[in-house]
Image (tube, rainbow, N blue to C red):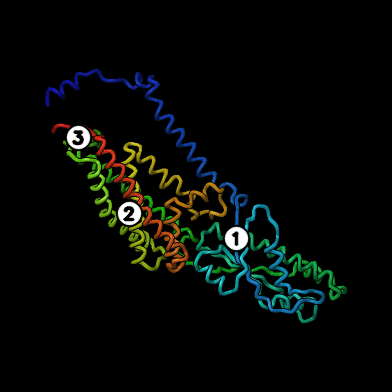
Amino acid sequence: MASSSSQRQSLPQARAAALLRRPKLWLIPTVLSGLLALLLSLLYMGGILNPNQDLHRLPIAIVDADRGQPLPGQQQNLGAQVTQAITTAAAPGNPVDWRQLTPSQVSDQLASGKIYGALEIPADFTASVAALTTANASARPTITVLTNPGVGSLGSSLASQITQKAAHQASLAVGQQLAASPATAGATATTRLLLADPITVTTQVGHPLGQHSGLGLSAFYYTLLLVLAGFLGANIINSGVDTALGYADNEIGPWHTRRPTVPIDRTQTLLLKMAMTAAITILTTTLVMVATIAVLGMDASHLPLLWVYSYCASLAVSLGVQAINAAFGGIGQLVSMFVFIVLGLPSSGATIPLQAVPGFYRFLSIFEPMRQLSGGVRAILYFDARADAGLARAWTMIAIGFAAALVFGFGMTRYYDRKGLHRLTPQPA
């Protein structure tokens, strides 16, 4: 051991200046760093720059509760006219999916996150408009915009802007009818100005959230915590096991050690890592909930269900990372980062609605883990853990993720073992 140490000390030491002149030393880091920067820029910025232009079939409800009689010379009351004008208005690319619903249906779909907002026409709408041309006018007619912050602040804001614009256009159209009515022929200039835009548009929260819900963003950040805890935890376990078994060097500051190599095949190594992952994820999941709910006070209900879901979601990510690392080796961390984070964030639909991103991201959302996991978290935190709010789909995709990680991971390691592709030649103690 002493002679080995003296031989290393007698070897000529390389100089950084000389190594910098080697093109091969630059090649791989430069190419990978450049590609990573380019892809990150395209993926992240490409999904957020123009949500209004990319908007496609954003689900918004319209409720026509108007029970008034049609105005003279009209076949429909004003509520039906406004509803028909809004739902049949031609717009390039169908940016809005207008859904004609009853009040009870709107409440149900707001409470399950199926719609981003609603436009509500009251029962006395026609009667209130007609009263404006008489001495019985008491108040301006009102159309109510309902928001749904549980689907995300940006999605709810987009829906609110769209519904308010539609309501304002409806007000102008009604104003034109009133201006042409014989009943307003002798109206004063002030009255005509009022009748030109006669409808008041009010905004209300259709499905309110608690004050500690991050304006509808707590579900996204909680999901991000689960994914990061699973991703980082799996990589820490992967490195720690490889170091403990002698398949990787341990370097902390100036101290460097290398343990004797333990004879173990790839399949048993992966089994060990996955078993440790399943146990350690219990701790990380518990700490995530303690930090976010007990310490920071995040609004959350169904706590036992949330813990079980959080554990399974984070574990599914961790097992996927372990499988990818076992299959790809040294570049496994980079591959899993793209699978679970780089491609997952812009296609999650948690900050920007999927209806407001380019089609490529909507395609990714079909299978990207973060999209599936955020839907389940959102359902538990905001929508009373309803299965139809995304929880059923989330559980299904978690089960698929478990199965995919096990089949892919152990399939690859068994293949490598049968081929005799051992990781390293055992090192002497």
Instruction: Examine the rendered structure and indicate whether residue 171 appears above or below residue 346.
Output: below
In the displayed structure image, the side of residue 328 where residue 359 appears, left or right: right
Give how far across and how far down residue 185 sits, in percent.
87, 73
Quadrant where the N terminus is found in the figure: top left
* Amino acid carrying mark 3 in the image: Arg
Kindly state the secondary structure of the residue where label 2 is placed.
Answer: helix
Mark earlier in primary sequence (3, 1)? 1
The residue shown at (19%, 18%) is 10
In the displayed structure image, the side of residue 176 where residue 212 appears, left or right: left
The residue shown at (64%, 60%) is 162
In the displayed structure image, the side of residue 70 where residue 256 appears, left or right: left
The front one of 257 and 272 is: 272
To which quarter of the image does residue 72 belong? bottom right
Spatial separation of the CA atoms under disc 2 and disc 1: 35 Å
Q: Which residue is mark 3?
A: 258
* Amino acid carrying mark 2 in the image: Leu
Q: Which residue is mark 1?
A: 159
Give how far across and how far down residue 365 sits, in percent.
48, 52
The residue shown at (16%, 24%) is 5
Q: Which label sits in the foreground, 3 or 2?
A: 2
